[in-house]
Image: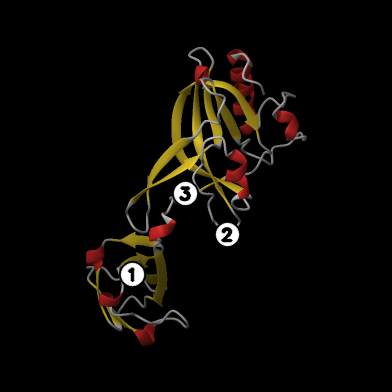
């Protein structure tokens, strides 16, 4: 779309896309034609917006907390999902989408006027709904482009890393099953291929999961080859107990 598209036309399309993604009101606006079907098997029409002032593609940054490292990370994206459109106030709520490959690799940060390089840097094949939202006045945009519709899953985004100071993260697990009696578990109590408890001094940190739920660090004591549960109650028989070990190499 050109830089001269009126804002009311853009916001009308966005409103129809909002309804479309909720499987409502199947119409034939330019973006919906790309679905080419009368049933809802997609939940997202990825969008790119052109800025009003310079006709460059609009980008936004998202900040999130990495659940593994507990550090805050950042990513940039020119791809969005429309969440809510207020035609009266000329405001649109957008969700940031992160472009990823099938293996979860992300594209490098977007450089001005280099949208083709953004998509050609890696083989982007899916979009992650990050749960990060922004409010934008529609008057900030002069045009938009609708990409092919997809089924976008919610997920935790990945942060941009500095290739000159890359970090390698290694993970391993010790898995055992509660018998509702023992508090102390040894390597010999672990299941096959997940039966080694390393020396805590050789790893960065560890996480304890009981029945899939993350537990506070004080709930267990770990030394090489042995884990002791410090909780008052012992997990019921058959409950999986998992120690996840994280080693960060700079």
Q: Quadrant of residue 218?
A: bottom left
Query: Is 129 situated above or below 189?
Result: above
- Residue 202 at what x, y percent from top left? 29, 76
Select label 1 or label 3 by which is in front: 3
- In space, the residues marked 1 and 2 are separated at their CA atoms by 35 Å
Discs 1, 2 touching: Cβ within 8 Å: no
Classify residue 211 as left or right of residue 218: right
Q: Which residue is mark 1?
A: 235
Residue 183: in sight, yes or no? no
- Residue 113 at what x, y percent from top left? 56, 35
What is the secondary structure assignment of the residue under circle 2?
loop
User: Residue 103 shows which numbered tag?
Assistant: 2
Which image quarter is the N terminus in?
A: top right
User: Residue 157 shows which numbered tag?
Assistant: 3
- Residue 67 at what x, y percent from top left? 37, 55
Select label 1 or label 2 by which is in front: 2
Classify 10 Å Cα crowding around label 2: few (below 14), some (14-19), many (20 and above). Answer: few
- In space, the residues marked 3 and 2 are separated at their CA atoms by 13 Å
Classify residue 10 as left or right of residue 129: right
The numbered mark, 1 or 2, whose residue comes first in the sequence reads 2
Give whichever of 233, 153 is nearer the camera. Answer: 153
What is the secondary structure assignment of the residue under circle 3?
loop
Task: Name which residue lies at 41% across and 75% down.
Answer: 175
The numbered mark, 1 or 3, whose residue comes first in the sequence reads 3
- Residue 194 at what x, y percent from top left? 44, 79
Q: Quadrant of residue 64?
A: top left
């Amino acid at each position: 779309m050109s830089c001269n598209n009126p804002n009311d036309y853009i916001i009308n399309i966005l409103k129809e896309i909002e309804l479309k993604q909720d499987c409502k009101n199947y119409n034939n606006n330019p973006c919906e034609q790309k679905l080419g079907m009368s049933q809802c098997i997609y939940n997202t029409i990825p969008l790119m917006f052109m800025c009003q002032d310079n006709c460059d593609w609009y980008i936004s940054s998202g900040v999130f907390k990495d659940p593994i490292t507990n550090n805050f990370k950042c990513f940039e994206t020119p791809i969005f999902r429309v969440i809510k459109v207020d035609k009266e106030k000329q405001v649109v709520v957008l969700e940031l989408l992160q472009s990823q490959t099938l293996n979860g690799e992300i594209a490098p940060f977007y450089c001005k006027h280099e949208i083709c390089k953004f998509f050609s840097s890696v083989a982007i094949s899916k979009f992650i709904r990050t749960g990060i939202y922004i409010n934008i006045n529609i008057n900030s945009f002069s045009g938009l482009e609708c990409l092919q519709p997809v089924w976008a899953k919610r997920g935790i985004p990945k942060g941009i890393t500095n290739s000159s100071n890359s970090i390698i993260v290694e993970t391993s697990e010790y898995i055992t099953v509660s018998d509702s009696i023992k508090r102390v578990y040894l390597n010999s109590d672990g299941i096959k291929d997940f039966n080694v408890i390393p020396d805590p001094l050789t790893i960065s940190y560890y996480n304890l999961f009981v029945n899939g739920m993350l537990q506070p660090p004080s709930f267990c004591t770990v030394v090489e080859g042995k884990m002791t549960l410090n909780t008052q109650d012992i997990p019921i028989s058959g409950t999986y107990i998992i120690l996840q070990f994280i080693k960060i190499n700079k």
